Image: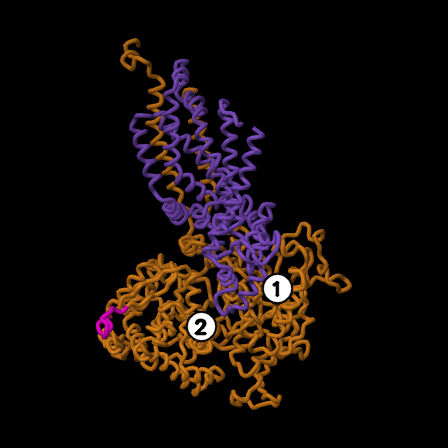
Chain colours: A purple, B orange
Amino acid sequence: MFAYLVRRLLYAIPILIGVNIITFTLFFVVNTPDDMARMQLGIRRVTQEAIDKWKIERGYDKPLFMNRQASGAGVLTDTIFFTKSARLFVGDFGRAEDGRDISKEIASRMGPSLAVAVPTFLLGIFVAVIFALVLVFFRASRLDFWGVVLCVAMMSISGLFYIIGGQYLVSRLWRLVPISGYAAGLDAWKFLVLPVVIGVVSGIGASTRLYRAFFLEEIGKDYVRTARAKGLSEAVVLFRHVLKNALIPILTGVVVVIPLLFMGSLLTESFFGIPGLGSYTIDAIRAQDFSIVRAMVFIGSVLYIVGLVLTDISYVLVDPRIRLE
Amino acid sequence: MSKSSRPFRGFFRSLLLCLLVFVAACGSERNDPYPLSERDQNILYSAFVGRPKHLDPVQSYVEDESVFTAQIYEPPLQYHYLKRPYDLIPGTAVSVPKPEYYDASGLRLPDDAPSGRIASSVYEVRIRPGILYQPHPAFAVDADGRLVYDALDEKKLAGIDAIADFERTGSRELTADDYIYQIKRLAHPRLHSPIFGLMAGHIVGLKELGESLQRDAKTLPANVWIDLDAYPLEGVTRVDRYTWRVKLRGRYPQFLYWLAMPFFAPVPREADKFYSQPGMAERNLTLDWYPVGTGPYMLTENDPNRRMTLERNPNFHGETYPCEGADGDAEAGFLADCGRALPFIDKAVFTREREGIPYWNKFLQGYYDASGISSDSFDQAVRLNVGGDVQLSDEMEARGIRLLTSVDASTFYMGFNLADPLVGGSGAGVGAERARKLRQAVSIAIDQEEFISIFMNGRGIPAMTPLPPGIFGFHEGEEGINRVVYDWSSGHARRKPIEEARRLLAEAGWPSGRDAKTGEPLVLNLDTTVGGMGDKSRLDWLTRCFARINVQLVVRSTDFNRFQDKLNKGSVQLFYLGWNADYPDPENFFFLLSGNEGVLLRGGENKSNYANAEFDRLFATMKDMDNTPERLKIIDRMNRILQNDAPWVFGFHPKTYTLAHAWLHNRKPNNVANNTLKYQRIDVAQRAERRREWNIPVVWPLALVGIAFAAALYPAMIVYRRRERATACGDAERNRSA
């Protein structure tokens, strides 16, 4: 397995370089260094001289990919692409165009993002599994039928509706928790209750239906019949045996998402005033801050690769038949 | 319950426990987003939407940033809080300086000397002694009077992440040198002050200083502090500890307005040097992040992604609330605090709200002291009465909320690119006269009143000239109307009928929207950014306006960058833009149409590339004049020229509606000054009472949810038990055996 992991990590290098090239190209197709300078310096009273000075200072006066005026390796290294991208691979994200340290910013925003995402993720899985098992227990009954109908209805509703409706009911009408905001430490709980509940509720429909399908597939298998024949109660059959075996597709589906929890959720964080990473990339795109955009895309790519590797590992852990070679 | 049902039982018990804990925790104001320790304190709560980019006064130029910088930094001058039209009064200065004029040989000229003779103007600013900076580690000194934190390195900075982490702070008196230092910072090559180009044209020696600094900066490492005191600036001199002089080229009366802006606020060299030490920038410890000022407040928390906090500066020199105001201010209660010491509020907490819905709801719950009105909440907040006036809704009135309205010192317009052969008539184009009539016809056809009513909920007034209300030269009533577009009838300005626009179009050579010679339809192109004026409904409406005179409008949506590029290259035909005043002077609007500011020829702010010799001549005269009847006459003439030439379709001046709770006092809309926090006062007891009254939690829905859950659970449990007890043969067999 070790050799497999090393190979996967080595594969990641060209993938990351490719992602970086695509990000760079896309960004500079839409924005020129002049546009970036204008955005950073402001629209009013900005002279071309000021724009040129800004570009020189930030290194945006160089060619994008190839510097024909340079010699030797400088042809490739004395370019915007190289100077702005090479340091990413040693974990140095540098500074945003407004001068602020990107690593520090990411570190400070990651906590709030995780504070919402982790409980939502764990509770979401827990609740969806329970609901799916209940539906399976009452399979082919009216409860199962209406449960599935409810799931379809819930997954058809936009996430924004849950957020706005939840804020209106719970915070505005019932005045039970703050409508938005955030506090550090344990004081954060009252700000997290509502986004977490809404996150869980909005995800129940789709997850429950999916897990129900996994459980139904398992419940028809021989080992389940054997368990019943042993005289085990239906609850024990479901929770001890079916759940354990159905966890394989569930687990492999959710593990890939775990690293991406760091990236936060744009919608939830915007509406609930959570100062997380969710809006960092969007804000940077709006501000034409290439330094942040490339750093966030890079981190996103790394986390996605990590997620895929973890998924592979989880296969091995939950299914002894699988070997990574 | 059987053993097999235990998993359910455990889960439901946990759920019930959680609900009980939550309900037990439900005292009053469970939805209070602020810490309990802040309750009933003299704190103003506000919100901000956009993250401020710069808090360094040399760079900061947008309103999102002025909300903070204007409370922290003190320029020499400020605007009177209550008086209208806006009146400059001393800030840290002893008095508003009067310029002295000199000719080319250095001879003093009388105050009324013609501008042509004036080679230079000198402003002498004397600041009040005894003004202290806020406590800050940059000023901390040891027993010997040496700065404690002027030789920091990574080792000494270990464990320091914020300014509050420095153990010691100090202060010192504000001096003239601090203002001089800041003026030199305008030329700093690494700071990119947006007004450097403008000021380099006025302040003697600033351009040369910029070149000199640029030259030296190239030879120095990027993070090395540049000691600006080592660089002379010819036009700015120190007279004594509290007095400095600035020498300008020619006459520039608008300079006084600049002296009321943060660009000319003092920056102590200790602070600049302190932040330039190694390791500081890596910790985001910069002047751009942690300002150092003498104003009534200091920034004690800077998390622009969540919360920014201003706290009372304990060293503030003191100021009193004004005792004079505009008409009606006394009746409105704005003079009730006359003579009382400022500031009233101890702390201001600004929370970032990216979305309007939470912002609005928190305002209604009393957790924000004031709010704007978004279009989503407009109908809930206000209603139009029979006379078309805006009134608060019953719900707002019942809460004691007040509505504050003001017309912004801004103008929005649709510009014609006069360099375009069709709408400008230049070169091999259609000719100036035809193009002028075409522009006039379009000006009539675009019904601004309808636009304001449909798309702005009535929050604006149609513009007749570039000048908004409150700016010298603006006229109310018949005197102020644009006679090309409006008639005066029954005491109101009435837009000319569409037939007049068609007539003008026919005279221009496009009867019924077709070229009189070729029969080709007249097609005009509007360049716009997506999401700005690019909203589909607005553009559909605009297209219909053009269709009324049989002109086809082609909308060319583009991104912001390309739009700017097209404007700068003059490759647009029609475009929408707006302008917010830097200062309340007509020069700040008319320069947008000055020939010397043409974007194609000079790279200036005149995006229409409009040039009229008479207008330019009048502008050159008007900009150097005081607000006299002669100046008013010139302005009137300039307005007539613009109305006739129609380089812009004058759009509207937006109105700002602000809602303020009853406990917030002295909040008067101000479109020019931003240092308004110090004047505002909060009745803390009233706010606490209202908050308690408005935020009693409603717990019964939780109980209802629990009951509904139990109700759903009960039949499920019955079914579960029945299944568990069922045999393979079913109930009949079991009964028989029993």
Q: Residues within 10 Å of mark 1 (few under 14, many from 20)?
A: many
Instruction: Name the quadrant containing residue B200.
Output: bottom right
Magenta run includes residue B407? no
**What element does badge 1 sit on?**
loop
- Read off the residue under disc 1: B292
Q: What kind of secondary structure does the magenta stretch mostly adopt?
A: loop
Q: Residues within 10 Å of mark 2 (few under 14, many from 20)?
A: some
Q: Quadrant of the N terminus of chain B?
A: top left
Q: Position of residue B34 (x, y in %)?
A: 50, 52
Of residues A66 and B417, which is closer to you in this image? Answer: A66
Q: Amino acid at mark 2?
A: Leu
Q: Quadrant of the C terminus of chain B?
A: top left
- Residue B33 in view: no
Count of labels in the image: 2
Residue that extends furthest to the top in the rendered view of this protein? B737
Residues in magenta, as a range: B511-522
Q: Position of residue B127 (x, y in %)?
A: 62, 76
Q: Chain of mark 2?
A: B
Q: Is residue B9 left or right of residue B392?
A: right
Q: Position of residue B139 (x, y in %)?
A: 68, 63
- Read off the residue under disc 2: B600
**What element does badge 2 sit on?**
helix
| Sooner in the amino-acid sequence: mark 1 or mark 2 | 1
- The label nearer to you, 1 versus 2, is 2
